[in-house]
Image: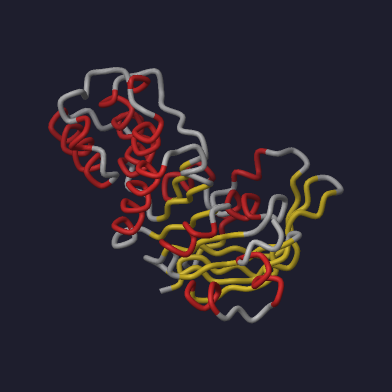
Amino acid sequence: MIKFNIKDLNIWFGSIYALKHVSMEIQANEILSIIGPSNSGKTTFLRMLNRLNDLNQSFKMTGAIKLEQEDLSSIDAEFLRKKVGMVFALPLPLPLSIFENVAYGVRMQGIKDKKVLAQTVENSLKESYLWEEVQNRLSESAFKLSGGQQQRLCIARTLAVQPEVILFDEPCSGLDPISTAKVEDAMVKLKEKYTIVLVTNNVKQAARVGDRTAFFLNGELIELDKTDKIFTVPADKRTDGYVRGEFG
């Protein structure tokens, strides 16, 4: 099943031509890794999938993006961001308890039943591989958690509102190897229920978790293929040079 269908997408921020003629499909229940050097358009592309670029006054686009069969531009932005959640590079817990961080979005949807909230929090923390570490600390401030735990808490907060898609923008950039491994384990498990798009500067991470990998360079999609092919026999010499560490 095709989750996103992108056709001839072009994006500008003022005079900056950020994405050029990008066309691709994103499959449901896959992890799509997106790699490329800085300023290649990776994050611009990611933010386009839940219309965060719309918040920039200089933003302009042509082309089309469909979420399943619905044009993205016709979907209410607030509703879209419930369906397409995002986890950012730096964990941003709310100044609340661990429990209330996860419950926040659910409460905003009007759900007040304590049993429903408690079950949602527990399920979300289990899916983000954090429950065992915090189940006896739910009333503590989220700021008492380590950086890696805070990132998994942000994943749990995203999961609690039951999105269909999760966008990850460099989610492990500031984490130690053990925390990174836990986030990656969570991603691999989550793709059973969600579609995942991961932007990462860590090509080894892209290789570990991605079902398919897209390589961006200077705002263009150079190559998109199964991850093992991208990292062993890429079709484009620029892809080969990047994954070998010859530039970036």
- 107 on left or right of 39: left
Task: Determine the residue positioned at 22% across, 19% down.
Answer: 139
Q: Quadrant of residue 203?
A: bottom right
Q: How is the image coloured?
A: secondary structure
Q: Residue furthest left?
A: 115
- Image coordinates for residue 213, horizontal then vertical, percent: 53, 68
In-front residue for pair 76/148: 148
In-front residue for pair 29/151: 151
- 32 on left or right of 39: left
Task: Determine the residue positioned at 29% across, 25% down.
Answer: 98
Which quarter of the image is occupied by the C terminus?
A: bottom right
In-front residue for pair 78/149: 149
Query: Could one spot residue 62 in this view of the protein?
Result: no
- Image coordinates for residue 239, horizontal then vertical, percent: 66, 71
- Image coordinates for residue 51, horizontal then vertical, percent: 59, 48
In-front residue for pair 25/115: 25
**Residue 189, relative to residue 56: is it above or below?**
below
Task: Determine the residue positioned at 17% across, 36% down.
Answer: 116
Which quarter of the image is occupied by the N terminus?
A: bottom left
Q: Quadrant of residue 177?
A: top left
Task: Determine the residue positioned at 20% across, 32% down.
Answer: 117
- 49 on left or right of 53: left
- Image coordinates for residue 165, horizontal then vertical, percent: 42, 55
Query: Could one spot residue 151 in this view of the protein?
Result: yes
